[in-house]
Image (cartoon, rainbow, N blue to C red):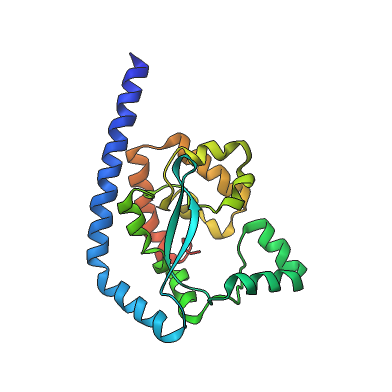
């Protein structure tokens, strides 16, 4: 009886969470459309190349999908990264530890603002509407990050990746990758509609303070 009740609660929360995803993502796309048009124009004027950057990421149940973002880097970002890491051992260590660089020369002037404000992630609202992502969940990872999760990758694969999540609202810029994995595992094991709503509310001050930025 207790197990049936728990399953019923999880199924109900899953349906409500998906409904919340659709309603909120659609409302945000409509409300933020003027901002997104302005951002697209700024990218087109200041940096040659596509406005939207699509990268293959790992989703629920290990399925891959094209994660959308406003482009914040030079078009030759991958080649620039390889050359940079080859020439700077200290940056190789930083990249290996966190999969990011605190001072990344590949980021454009407009891109720096978009990342700090998290505006670059607004196109992921389309991923949410498609069902590839959720409003709340682990940040989507690329394939070469899977080994870093070890046996805990099943926790990551058990939920949809999200626009925001536990890691983002608990000071992600100051945390190690190991703590990121721990946050994702904790979220997957504690997932509920109320937990998601709490994280969504916590996201607002995190974004305003810049602590939720990439």
User: Residue placed at 68% from the left, 63% from the top?
Assistant: 94
Q: Residue visible at 30% across and 25% down?
A: 8
Q: Residue sitting at 56 percent across and 49 percent down?
A: 180
Report x, y in % for residue 160.
41, 44
Which quadrant of the structure image shows residue 6? top left
Counting every numbered tag in the picture gives 0
Percent x, y of residue 27:
22, 59
* Residue 66, horizontal then vertical, whole percent: 44, 57
Determine the image quadrant of residue 77: bottom right
Q: Residue furthest top?
A: 1
Q: Tell me: 188 left or right of 76.
A: left
76 vs 137, left or right, is right
Nearer to me, 198 or 27: 27
Q: Is residue 34 above or below residue 152?
A: below
Q: Does 73 sit left or right of 2 as displayed?
A: right
- Residue 204 sits in quarter: bottom left
Query: In the rendered image, which quarter contains the N terminus?
Result: top left
Q: In the rendered view, would you say 210 is above or below 65?
A: below
Tell me residue 106's x, y (percent). 58, 75
> Residue at horizontal 49%, vertical 75%?
112
**Where 214 sits versus 185, above or below?**
below
């Amino acid at each position: 009886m207790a197990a049936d009740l728990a399953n019923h609660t999880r199924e109900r929360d899953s349906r409500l969470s998906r409904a919340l995803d659709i309603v909120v993502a659609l409302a945000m796309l409509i409300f933020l459309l003027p901002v997104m048009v302005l951002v697209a124009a700024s990218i087109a004027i200041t940096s040659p190349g596509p406005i939207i950057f699509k990268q293959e990421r790992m989703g629920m149940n290990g399925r891959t999908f094209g994660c959308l973002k406003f482009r914040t880097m030079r078009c030759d970002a991958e080649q620039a990264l390889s050359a940079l890491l080859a020439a700077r051992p200290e940056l190789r260590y930083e990249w290996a530890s966190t999969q990011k660089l605190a001072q990344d020369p590949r980021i454009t002037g407009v891109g720096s603002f978009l990342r700090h404000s998290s505006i670059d992630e607004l196109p992921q609202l389309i991923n949410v509407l498609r069902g590839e992502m959720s409003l709340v969940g682990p940040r989507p990872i690329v394939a070469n990050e899977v080994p870093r999760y070890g046996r805990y990758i099943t926790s990551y694969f058990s939920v949809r990746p999200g626009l925001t999540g536990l890691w983002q609202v608990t000071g992600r810029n100051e945390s190690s990758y190991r703590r990121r994995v721990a946050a994702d595992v904790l979220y997957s094991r504690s997932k509920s509609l109320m937990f998601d709503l709490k994280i969504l509310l916590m996201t607002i001050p995190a974004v305003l303070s810049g602590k939720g930025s990439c």
